[in-house]
Image: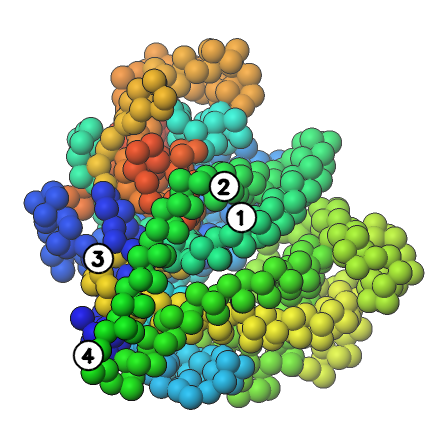
Amino acid sequence: MSLRTAAAAVAIMLVTQTTYADEGMWLFNAPPLKQLKDKYGFEPDAKWLEHVQKSSVRFNSGGSGSFVSPNGLVMTNHHVGADDLQKLSTPEKNYLRDGFHAKTLKDEIPCKGLELNVLQSIKDVTAEVNEATKGLKPEEAFAARQKKIGEIEKANADPAKGTRADVVTLFAGGAYHLYVFKKYTDIRLVFAPEKAIAFFGGDPDNFEYPRYDLDVCFFRVYEKGEPLKPDHHLSWSPAGSKEGELIFVSGHPGRTNRQNTVAELEYLRDTGYPFVLQRLNRLEVLLKAWVDRSEGNRQKGEDELFGIQNSRKARIGGLQGLLDPELLGRKKAEEQRLKEYIETRIAQKDKKTPEEEALLAAAQKAFETIAAAEKERARLIKEMTLLENGAAFNSHLFQVARTLARAADELPKPAGERLREFGDARLDSLKFQLFSDEPIYDDLEALKLADGLTLLANHYGADHDFVKQVLAGKSPKDRAFELVSGTKLKDVEVRKKLFDKGKAAVDEAKDPMIELARLVDPQARKLRKEFEAKIDEPKRGAYAALAKARFALDGDKTYPDATFTLRLSYGTVKGYKEGNTVVPAFTTFEGLYARSKEHGNKEPFELPKRWEDRKGKLDLSTPFNFVSTADIIGGNSGSPVVNKAGEVVGLIFDGNIQSLVLDFIYDDKEARAVSVDSRAIVEALRKVYDAEDLANELTGKK
């Protein structure tokens, strides 16, 4: 196939490398129909795909979910809902620790700042976006592209109908798809188990297997004050799954790096991951010491601590993969194969169009372009993280202040010239988050902000002019206390007033946190612009050229990297062998009690009292957790696992330690996705929690 043909076909499907086994986080508009038919004799039709797509839900707080009843009931993980459980808790009622069950609709509790999205349609807009940047220099191309994307999103979003539109970048710039979502913001908590059973085994068992976790949480979507009647919802499988069965996972994987060149992987190995791990380790020590000081501190900070610990363990696993010569060897072999193809095509004497000549030249140069961009990234990443990404100002209140300050500057501009987060199509979601009345804890804010300011001083030096301006003659601890105690931004009405009245009101507010955001903003914007011009834009063009070359080489055999948009994965329920140990596909309730006893029923293996009291009522042979070869990554948490009939058989909540390399490369020898079995969920609801109403709603019983 010529590169000219590839350029025309790239909008349909691009590739990174030849896939094998059950690999793939597939686009719903380009599913792996041939692979499924050839290997499993099953080919989902358009009706099946639409049903699963529109039953799937994205949690904008980070995670996946699904409609599982005709009355707007949404299922996800306890750890996906943990942020909302923490926000809804009070000193008297700790829902994150103790769980929650709404016996009736009127008992369901409205969430704070939670937005759910359901994908309605996908449209390829690659040609429109690329046309806007034709012949432009990198810095000009970036601005022109953002303007065109903003125009497309604005034209396709309809706030009055509750829809949002996002142009999603695929193949690192090789394609652009318009995703239109139905947006829901009236979300209410229905059920959550105790954290002790949802996260049984704690950090020691996290990313391990066997597992024994009831990591499930239920919410309900309301519209116009009534439970939503969704057009699509998943039915519950009466039989669950069995070993060897084909299963599907429909969810929102966050980010993978499988298209990365070796140069980019080496950057992550040598600079990116070590830098992130330093930051995570620092925050973990800080927060762990703080939450252990009192039960009140624990209630405020344990969900954030869990996120940091989870990220730390995931990055360690990813770094181990990058340090594995076998993994890097596979990536080098893939890259060499592509290089040889490009060089062969250039050397061939057949007549090529000017367009094809240009594409070949760009693809040949792409590796060098990306390597140069990664050197710039290594140079800028620490300052970029500190200032633009806000690590030096680790505070929710600072983020509020920055949003208000930037909104005052950005909103008077034409939509296409604003920072992307202030585009017209994104404003409703931005305001929904900005005006959320979620609790803000002064002591936790001051703790984190003081640590961030210390990090800033450590990086630049205490005598640096910028550091002196930020600290204003005080220690990081005293300055953080001054900022947090002095700001009025905890008041949602103050935020609304400043946002609505614009620049004049923000200028006159004299709020210390806003003044800090304005002090930082010139340098932060400068870094962002430099990062976009020297790193993002060159890489975008280079990866687009490589994607087209790969398409010409391999055809439509694979899928783009994850982008926190809806994908379909598949695999089989299957155990594995770890060394000489055979790890079975399923665990049971009986194994849960045995593991707790093995550890003396002590934290994090301590069972909630009701689980001890109700042990005799349970069928201990009930499958509890299971593993499969489905291809998942962070963001898939809360994804439904369905069978060929589209029925729920499980709920993704983790991967094993061997799966942490899936960020870079697929492997099914030992890597597994870990799920809660659907049978365990119903068994626990009925016999441990007396939640017959909820179990009946799931299983369709009156």
Q: Which mark is residue 350?
A: 4
Residue 605 percent across, percent down from the top left: 50, 20
Question: Are circles 1 and 2 on residues that touch, CB within 8 Å?
Answer: yes
Q: Can you tell which quarter of the image residue 384 is in?
A: bottom right
State the quadrant of the N terminus. Answer: bottom left
Q: Which mark is residue 269?
A: 1
Q: Earlier in the sequence, mark 1 or mark 2?
A: 1
Check disc 2 and report the residue beneath it. 323
Check disc 3 and report the residue beneath it. 557
The one of 411 and 336 positioned closer to us in this rendering:
336
Q: How many marks?
A: 4
Q: Earlier in the sequence, mark 3 or mark 4?
A: 4
Q: Earlier in the sequence, mark 3 or mark 1?
A: 1
The nearer-to-camera label among 3 and 2 is: 2
Element marked by disc 4: loop
Residue 191 in view, yes or no: no
The nearer-to-camera label among 4 and 2 is: 4
Asked if 188 appears above or below 702 in the picture, the reply is below
Asked if 691 appears above or below 533 in the picture, the reply is above
Residue 168 percent across, percent down from the top left: 38, 68
- Residue at screen point 33% across, 53% down: 334
